[in-house]
Amino acid sequence: MREHDHDPRPADELFWLLRTTLRRMRREVRDQLAPVELTPARHRMLRVLARSGEPQRQATLAGWLDVVPRSITSMVDDLEHAGLVERRPDPTDRRATLVSLTPEGRAVLGAADAERRRRADELLSRLSPAEQDELFRLLHRLADED
């Protein structure tokens, strides 16, 4: 092997381990939240709306979620049908629509976030406190941009 060649195994294994762990966590949370049909994409939209603190235009949501506007329209349609968001006209632009969380949407988001935390705690409980600290330290090191 030449000096600039790298063994692909560590990178392949890293991606496999991260993907497998995250997929397991998402699947477990999705299964728990199946009655409200909260997919990862819908959950993400509810979180974005909650964090914004105010109603948002669909175009703004599309930008924040990095999806095409027609995807936002169908996602908002589904969430509105489920009673988790509501649309109303934008008072500053007749052509625009504002989307906001409903009280039911806030409750479902709270339940989803609590379930995610519970599942993460359950997964992390396999590690000692020192191992958890080391895992977080290493993941932060990998995630930090130089």
Image (cartoon, rainbow, N blue to C red):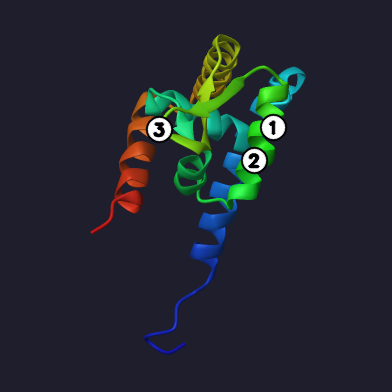
Q: Position of residue 122 (x, y in %)?
A: 55, 21
Q: Is residue 26 visible?
A: no
User: Amino acid type of disc 3?
Assistant: Thr
Q: Residue furthest left?
A: 146
User: Amino acid type of disc 1?
Assistant: Asp
User: Residue at (56%, 14%) from the top-left corner?
Assistant: 102
User: Residue at (67%, 17%) from the top-left corner?
Assistant: 83
Give 16 or 43, whichever is nearer the viewer. Answer: 43
The residue carrying mark 2 is 73
Q: Residue furthest front?
A: 94
Q: Is 6 positioned to the left or the right of 74 in the image?
A: left
Q: Position of residue 54 (x, y in %)?
A: 40, 24
Q: Is residue 40 above or below residue 19?
A: above
Badge 2: residue crowd in 10 Å (few <14, some 14–19, many ≥20): some
- Indicate the secondary structure of the residue bearing disc 2: helix
- Indicate the secondary structure of the residue bearing disc 1: helix
Q: Is 129 positioned to the left or the right of 1 in the image?
A: left
Q: Which mark is residue 92?
A: 3
- Mark found first going from the N terminus, 3 or 1: 1
Marks 3, 1: nearer the viewer:
3
User: Amino acid type of disc 2?
Assistant: Thr
Measure how far apart labels 3 and 1 are at the Cα level. Answer: 22 Å
User: Residue at (38%, 39%) from the top-left corner?
Assistant: 135
The residue carrying mark 1 is 77
The part of the image, by quadrant, that contains residue 72 is top right
Q: Position of residue 146 (x, y in %)?
A: 23, 59
Marks 3, 2: nearer the viewer:
3
| Disc 1 to disc 2: CB gap under 8 Å | yes
